[in-house]
Image (cartoon, rainbow, N blue to C red):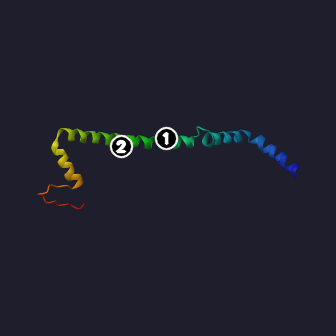
Amino acid sequence: MDNGFLPQLKAFLGKYKYWIVFVLFLLVILVASDNSMIKRIVQKREIHALQEQLRESTELKRQNEQTLNELNNDSLVIDRIAREKYNMHRADEDLFLESH
């Protein structure tokens, strides 16, 4: 039983040794190494998500700075923001809310 298997295995390995080495090399590159392609793809997705989050945070910061500047320079802005965002009103006013 062993006499027939070992010569066949040696013949197979001898015939396809370059393909076997190539496939093993691809497996190491794609999966097993620290710089594998799979890890690189995951890292690129994370980078893209973090860049998008940074863009959103930068835009929010810009909007907040603009609102702060308006609040510091115009006293009517506080009144407008209180009315729009918090549905506040003066004691002598009636408030009508629209449902969206």
Mark closer to the chain start, 1 or 2: 1
Q: Give the x, y percent position of residue 47.
A: 46, 40
| Residue type (three-letter) at the residue carrying disc 1 | Lys
Q: Quadrant of the C terminus?
A: bottom left
The mark lying in front, picked from 1 and 2, is: 2
Mark 2 closeness class: few <14, some 14–19, many ≥20 residues within 10 Å: few
Would residue 40 be found to the left or right of residue 87 on screen? right
Mark 1 closeness class: few <14, some 14–19, many ≥20 residues within 10 Å: few
Q: Give the x, y percent position of residue 90.
A: 14, 55
Q: Which mark is residue 60?
A: none
Residue beneath label 2, please?
56
Residue drawn 51% across the image and 41% down it: 43
Tell me how far mark 1 sits from mark 2, CA to CA.
18 Å
Would residue 11 be found to the left or right of residue 44 on screen? right
Residue drawn 74% across the image and 40% down it: 17
Residue beneath label 1, please?
44
* SS assignment at label 2: helix
